[in-house]
Image: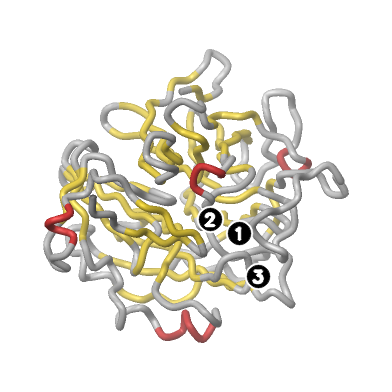
């Protein structure tokens, strides 16, 4: 059996044979997949086509007309040589493996944020690309850096970006992984940081000073504030903040799970069902591994498509030796306005 290796940070996972291995060797041939292996998936829709972007060398892109059968762009959106030079200047050790993109259409133009980092450290940067159409995979233009963090300067990590446009049309970005948790900042109309704006913490895995946190098995630098991958969705007057708790990227040893809280204001405070502030460790479990199909699941996105509201994330498959597979689940809403799957 031929296996294709997929590298995420320092973790190497062997995929199951749902790839067309005859096509894998053809570097420029499209790869058709029914069970895509992904980390950190996000989606967009344009002219009858769904686009999926995720962590990968040069940012992985997949396209589909039905969200069931996917075609992978083998060389990624930013092949080596097209990755902006500033990314390596800002993040020593970063090369081609780009993490956790997010994509949004804003003021008639497509924008993509992407993460440049090295595993377990917070000297990181979030870059910005722009394009007039998702169909033009080679048309993405470098728009520079949105935010950057440095290990000896910042107590937050500039990865895992998510754009949100508030009810007044103002753009914001949330991001974060470990350290002091999830950050939020207002952007200007170019989707760069608004003049004078400063990041604020909107969610933590544990309240400040909590000594009951699980020791971190993945990084000696990040600490035990195991929260990352924020995504904010609007619904019926509320902003819903989804975050991932605990640890990813360890295959079948992962214990990733998703929690949620909500706020009437994009800047928070975000509270769970019991009224606990997510800055103090609040959040209701929304999805976790079922120990039958998936050991763990996380790093999500949520969308309103023509066929309803959908939750998207990756899960570590128990049948496929911990390979990270795409999960899509339809969202329902309770009478008091909370999402369920």
The earlier-in-sequence mark between 3 and 1 is 1
Residue 83 sits above or below residue 51 on the image: below
* Cα–Cα span, label 3 and label 1: 10 Å
- Residue bearing mark 3: 196
What residue is rendered at 20% in x and 45% in y? 33
Closer to the camera in the image, 23 or 337 = 23
Question: From the viewer's perspective, is 51 left or right of 331?
Answer: left
Helix, strand or loop status at disc 1: strand
For the residues labelled 3 and 1, say whether their Cβ atoms are less than 8 Å apart: no
Find residue 135 and report its image quarter. Answer: bottom left
What residue is rendered at 42% in x and 42% in y? 321
Q: Residues within 10 Å of mark 2 (few under 14, many from 20)?
A: many
What residue is rendered at 38% in x and 26% in y? 330
Q: Which dot marks residue 172?
A: 2
Image spot of residue 2 (x, y percent) = 23, 54
Q: Residues within 10 Å of mark 3 (few under 14, many from 20)?
A: few
Image spot of residue 84 (x, y percent) = 39, 81
Find residue 304 and report its image quarter. Answer: top left
* Cα–Cα span, label 1 and label 2: 6 Å
For the residues labelled 1 and 2, say whether their Cβ atoms are less than 8 Å apart: yes
Which label sits in the foreground, 3 or 1? 1
* Cα–Cα span, label 2 and label 3: 14 Å
The earlier-in-sequence mark between 1 and 2 is 2
- Residue bearing mark 1: 185
Image spot of residue 176 (x, y percent) = 61, 57
What residue is rendered at 76% in x and 31% in y? 276
Question: From the viewer's perspective, is 143 left or right of 139?
Answer: right
Helix, strand or loop status at disc 2: strand
């Amino acid at each position: 059996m031929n296996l294709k290796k997929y590298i995420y940070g320092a973790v190497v996972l062997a995929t199951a044979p749902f790839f067309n291995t005859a096509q894998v060797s053809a570097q420029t041939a499209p790869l058709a997949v029914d069970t895509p292996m992904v980390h950190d998936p996000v989606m967009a829709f344009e002219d009858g086509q769904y686009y999926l972007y995720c962590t990968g060398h040069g940012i992985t892109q997949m396209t589909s007309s039905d969200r069931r059968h996917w075609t992978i762009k083998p060389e990624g959106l930013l092949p080596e040589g097209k990755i902006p030079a500033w990314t390596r200047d800002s993040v020593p050790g970063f090369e081609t493996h780009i993490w956790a993109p997010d994509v949004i259409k804003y003021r008639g133009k497509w924008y993509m944020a992407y993460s440049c980092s090295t595993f377990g450290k917070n000297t990181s940067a979030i870059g910005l690309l722009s394009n007039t159409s998702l169909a033009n995979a080679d048309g993405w233009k470098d728009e520079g850096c949105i935010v950057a963090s440095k290990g000896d300067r910042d107590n937050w990590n500039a990865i895992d970006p998510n754009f949100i446009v508030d009810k007044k049309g103002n753009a914001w970005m949330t991001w974060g992984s470990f350290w002091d948790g999830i950050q939020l900042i207002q952007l200007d109309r170019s989707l760069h940081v608004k003049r004078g704006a400063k990041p604020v913490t909107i969610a933590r895995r544990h309240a400040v000073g909590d000594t009951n946190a699980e020791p971190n098995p993945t990084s000696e630098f990040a600490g035990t504030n195991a929260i990352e991958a924020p995504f904010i969705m609007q619904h019926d007057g509320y902003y819903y903040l989804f975050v991932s708790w605990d640890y990813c990227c360890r295959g079948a040893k992962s214990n990733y799970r998703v929690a949620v809280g909500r706020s009437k204001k994009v800047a928070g405070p975000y509270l769970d069902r019991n009224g606990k502030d997510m800055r103090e460790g609040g959040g209701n479990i929304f999805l976790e591994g079922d120990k039958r199909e998936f050991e763990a699941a996380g790093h999500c996105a949520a969308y309103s498509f023509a066929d309803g509201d959908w939750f998207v994330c990756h899960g570590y498959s128990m049948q496929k030796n911990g390979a990270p597979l795409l999960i899509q689940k339809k969202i329902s809403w309770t009478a008091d306005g909370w999402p369920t799957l």
